[in-house]
């Protein structure tokens, strides 16, 4: 019996070690977000040369927002260059004119009773789907399975995996002429018939009739749950059917995510999260990156690899980028993701290469 117990202890330890090794391989020290436009009007050789330059600088992975056909086309080039390809795709936002025309009921409704198809908040592409709609959930499962089945995809990468912003980042509010010191009805979602009926069935009250919905804890939790469910369901199906990992771009901290965009990423059961710790958006110094990473590590809930997302225009001077990397890695991040590739210069790549070499020397076994 003791031998059997020891065997399972050893097997469990080996599995954990192997998972950590795989995680490090898939989510390297330095990576970047980029869109398909970076390859626009480039020949295959030019794309390959670009990727080889990334690799030589130790930007070893790219979270690429692109159509499936582009993934299929560039995947062999990524493999040849030795750069990992993560499929970055908006999740709850869907701007398909066909889907909006056929499935208006898939989309969220504000506390004012306005469907985002008719009047998207803030910007014209904010067409958020309702996470409580089972047809939306099934649609997303199938869409991500299609992506994951493309050879060479390292992970499916969720983005906009949330509701519309209840609160914009501090630095953006003046741009829209807003002072968001409370939850405003035009930016408070979702009050569609399905959500209202489900909440009333469970709690006996209609959220549209609450005196102050922002103070109702049940209503707040009720909206967090379906986003968590979509992430965990899609990720589990993708892992089971294709073996592909899952990652997500999320808001800076679990607490901020819950209050600002109704996103509880602490409960996401995925392989990695990339909190978008864009200090300039919140009128914060670079040291805030380190403070945020530390809070994330301590409060993330379900364990996952944490890669700190940094906004290159806020740290465009190499000294600032160097400080941002220090703040992230010294406080527990396993890597840094840069947003985004078009903003990065050769000076940035040269710095990243130096930092990679320094890290390897100080972390040698």
Image (tube, rainbow, N blue to C red):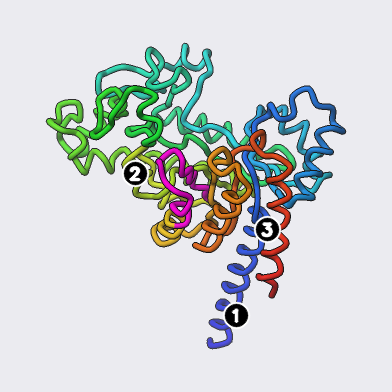
Which residue is tagged 3?
Answer: 355
What is the C-alpha distance between the residues marked 1 and 2? Answer: 42 Å
Q: Which mark is residue 7?
A: 1
Q: Earlier in the sequence, mark 3 or mark 1?
A: 1
Q: Earlier in the sequence, mark 1 or mark 2?
A: 1
Which picture quadrant has residue 169? top left
Which residue is tagged 2?
Answer: 258
What is the C-alpha distance between the residues marked 2 and 3? Answer: 34 Å
Asked if residue 147 shows in the view, the reply is no
Q: Are marks 2 and 3 in contact (CB under 8 Å)?
A: no
> Mark 2 or mark 3, which is nearer to you?
3
Q: Position of residue 1 (x, y in %)?
A: 53, 86
Secondary structure beneath label 3? helix
> Bounds of the magenta span?
271-290
Q: Position of residue 191 (x, y in %)?
A: 28, 26
Secondary structure beneath label 1? helix
């Amino acid at each position: 019996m003791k031998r059997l117990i020891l065997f399972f202890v050893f097997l469990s330890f080996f599995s954990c070690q192997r998972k950590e090794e795989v995680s490090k391989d898939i989510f390297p020290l330095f990576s970047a977000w980029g869109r398909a436009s970076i390859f626009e009007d480039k020949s295959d050789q030019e794309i390959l040369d670009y990727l080889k330059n990334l690799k030589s600088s130790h930007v070893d992975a790219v979270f690429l927002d692109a159509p499936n056909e582009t993934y299929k086309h560039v995947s062999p080039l990524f493999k040849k260059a030795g750069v990992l390809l993560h499929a970055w795709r908006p999740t709850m936002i869907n701007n398909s004119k066909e889907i909006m025309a056929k499935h208006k009921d898939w989309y969220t409704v504000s506390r004012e009773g306005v469907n985002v198809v008719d009047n998207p908040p803030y910007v014209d592409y904010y067409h958020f789907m309702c996470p409580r709609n089972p047809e939306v959930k099934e649609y997303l499962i199938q869409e991500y399975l299609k992506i994951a089945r493309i050879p060479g995809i390292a992970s499916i990468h969720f983005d906009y995996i949330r509701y519309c912003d209840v609160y914009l980042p501090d630095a953006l509010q003046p741009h829209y002429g807003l002072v968001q010191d409370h939850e405003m009805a035009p930016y408070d979602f979702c009050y569609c018939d399905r959500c209202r009926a489900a909440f009333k069935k469970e709690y006996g009250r209609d959220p549209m009739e609450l005196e102050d919905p922002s103070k109702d804890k049940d209503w707040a939790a009720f909206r967090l749950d379906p986003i968590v469910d979509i992430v965990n369901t899609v990720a589990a199906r993708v892992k089971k059917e294709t073996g592909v990992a899952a990652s997500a771009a999320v808001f800076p901290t679990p607490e901020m995510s819950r209050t600002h965009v109704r996103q509880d990423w602490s409960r996401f059961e995925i392989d990695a999260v990339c909190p978008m710790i864009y200090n300039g958006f919140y009128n914060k110094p670079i040291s805030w990156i380190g403070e945020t990473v530390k809070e994330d590590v301590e409060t993330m809930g379900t364990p996952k690899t944490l890669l700190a997302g940094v906004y290159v225009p806020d740290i465009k001077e190499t000294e600032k980028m160097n400080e941002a990397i220090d703040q992230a890695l010294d406080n527990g991040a396993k890597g840094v993701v840069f947003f985004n590739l078009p903003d990065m210069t050769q000076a940035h790549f040269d710095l990243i290469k130096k930092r990679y070499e320094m890290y390897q020397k100080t972390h040698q076994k």
